[in-house]
Amino acid sequence: MANTEELKRKITVVMFDQYGTVVDMQKGLTEMAAPFLRDKGWSGNPGSFVTWWRRTHFENSMIDALLHKEHTPYREIGHRAVAYTMDRAGISYTQDEVEYLVGCIERLTCFPDVPEALARLQTRYKIVVLSNGDPDMLETARQYHGVPFDRVISVAEANSFKPHVATYAKAAEIVGVRMDEVLFVANHAFDCLGAKAAGMHSAFIDRRKRPFGGTPHQPDLWIDDMKGLADIMV
């Protein structure tokens, strides 16, 4: 773990992943998908459906990043993932229904501890989002999560999904800071790992109580929730 006083002197920007770190993606999408799946007559676990959906989306976005050709919009990746998941579950669907489910992502709300913690952090640092989401999706999301970020950046600016190094470098360039002046915050290891490997500092929000793994790119901070981050950094 990093020396927190030294880290506080160095950091000028705290940068956040949005989906799953600021907003509660698993719980929110499960609650939104449950009535849809019930109406479809599907008797499986809505939480499992959302997990399948999210894992498929992640896999497809990583393939897109590795190909590093023309960037595929997050929404399009989402449509493919939801359609695949419904095919896998044996659920009949229309394109409108696929688009409805992916559109639910824009209406997700914050984890309960987030607004107060980010308000505290904002008294000392700029707070910024770097998300795999499309620019228009992130703009719509503002009215639902309600956090007044100083800047919201889509990876579309870098033509790739996180954790490609170009995404973190472009975000630092847009905000106008050095990489090592940024503390990147996420509740999943791949994003912390990507940011740290790119030259940022990182904080792992361990809400799910999972191991980080044996990567050399370990997080500088490992905390239980956003309140814990604010307690350490403000």
Image: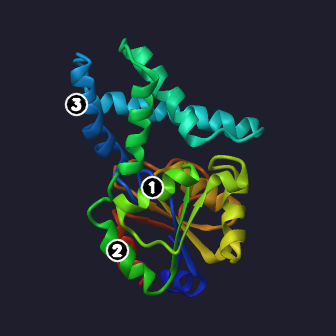
Disc 1: CA contacts within 10 A as few (<14), some (14-19) or many (>=20): few
Instruction: Residue type at mark 2: give it.
Output: Ala
Q: Which mark is residue 35?
A: 3
Q: How many numbered marks appear?
A: 3
Disc 2: CA contacts within 10 A as few (<14), some (14-19) or many (>=20): some
The residue carrying mark 2 is 117
Q: Residue at x 51, y 34 (%)?
A: 78
Quadrant containing the C terminus in the rendered view: bottom left
Q: Residue at x 64, y 67 (%)?
A: 200
Q: In this view of the protein, can residue 216 be seen by the observer?
A: no
Question: Closer to the camera: disc 2 or disc 3?
Answer: 3
- Mark 2 or mark 3: name the one nearer the start of the chain: 3
Local secondary structure at mark 2: helix
Local secondary structure at mark 1: helix
Q: Position of residue 22 (x, y in %)?
A: 40, 60
Above or below residue 227? Residue 234 is below
